[in-house]
Image (cartoon, rainbow, N blue to C red):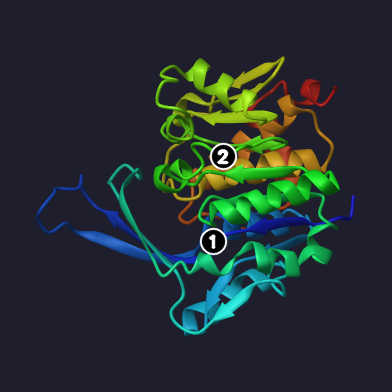
Amino acid sequence: MSKPVICIGASFVDELFHAGDPVLKATTNSASVTKTSGGVSRNIAHQLAMLGVPVHLISVFGSDSDGRWLKDQIQEVGVQVDASVTREGLSGKYTGILDADGSLFAAFLTNSALEWITPEYLQSQSNLLEEAAFILADANISVEAVQWLLSFCGSKQIPFILEPVSVPPAKKFQHIDMQGMYLITPNEDELPVMCDERAGLTQHQIEELLNRGVQKIWLHNGKHGSALYSRNHTISLHAPEVEVVDCTGAGDGSLTGYLLGKYLGFPDAACLRLAHTLSAEILQVNGAIAPKLSQEELLSRVPLYYPDFSSCLIP
């Protein structure tokens, strides 16, 4: 398959403060700091390109030095950014505070400027979009842009994936029609806010989204693993036990692994194992990307975490 995956959404500078001891509120905490490229769609595009998948990124960059740095970083690994927007002003920044155990204590997002990705702008890129093997958008973009993409992908028969990102952006999609959505990927906090308040149980929430037209819901439960729900089938998978260095980007890596599996034509059970393996590798490094990990190396590591991987490759 030579068609590209197109990722649409955020590109940020990730500035991460790593606490040396458990974070104390309302006082000074000692920490080290790292600066890396970030943003959900940017992270997924970057890792996919490193794994040998052709990728285009539609995002928004500032005209400042950070914007130039972000573009240079992702173009170096082969991601095409010609369809992205460069605007006057500061680039988006994600500032995260990581507790001593690597978990996220708090985070702040500034200057995202993703309102520039409008339905009209996406329409202007329709010649590129219609060539996609998959289109992925993160929920940082507007509801109107997602609805345009959903309609476009339906008309072109392109699988469309929505990554909820976090609770506030996920909540925007609580009442929209999702007919034809190929996949959404919430965690246990994001799933409830995408559903009616009366759907109090996970199973009720899954049923609601299926009834609203979503084909697959991939529910992430952190260290407890994940479950992939469809109308007639559910697949659950435990997460590998690893020593967490930095949780940033682990969810993005998981979706990247799943997309790689689908791009290679793998069944869902194999895709989940590939997804969890890439997520585990990212958890063990600083930043949102597993550096210097080729497709061949990643595939060779899956059986180390999941010895039954080869049997899952059989449909």
Q: Amino acid at mark 1?
A: Ala
Image position, residue 260 (x, y; %): 74, 44
What residue is shown with label 1? 10
Specify the quadrant of the image occupied by residue 69.
bottom right
Q: Earlier in the sequence, mark 1 or mark 2?
A: 1
- Residue at (79, 63) in percent of width and height: 126
The total number of labels drawn is 2
Is 32 placed left or right of 159 in the picture? left
Image position, residue 225 (x, y; %): 52, 26
Q: Compared to 248, does 73 lie above or below?
A: below
Q: Evaluate if marks 1 and 2 touch, with contact meaning CB atoms under 8 Å apart.
A: no
Q: Compared to 220, does 157 lie above or below?
A: below
- Residue at (71, 44) in percent of width and height: 160
Specify the quadrant of the image occupied by residue 177.
top right
Image position, residue 1 (x, y; %): 90, 49
Q: CA distance from mark 1 to mark 2?
A: 21 Å
Q: Compared to 294, does 312 lie above or below?
A: above
- Residue at (42, 41) in percent of width and height: 244
Kindly tell me whether residue 122 is visible in this rendering.
Answer: yes
What residue is shown with label 2? 176
- Residue at (53, 27) in percent of width and height: 239
Badge 1 crowding class, 10 Å Cα cut-off, few under 14, some 14 to 19, many 20 or more, is: many
Specify the quadrant of the image occupied by residue 14.
bottom left
Q: Nearer the viewer, mark 1 or mark 2?
A: 2
Q: Secondary structure at mark 2?
A: loop
Is 105 placed left or right of 28 in the picture? right
Kindly tell me whether residue 158 is visible in this rendering.
Answer: no
Mark seen at residue 309: none
User: Which is nearer the eye, 195 or 270?
Assistant: 195
Q: Secondary structure at mark 1?
A: loop
**Which quadrant holds the C terminus?**
top right
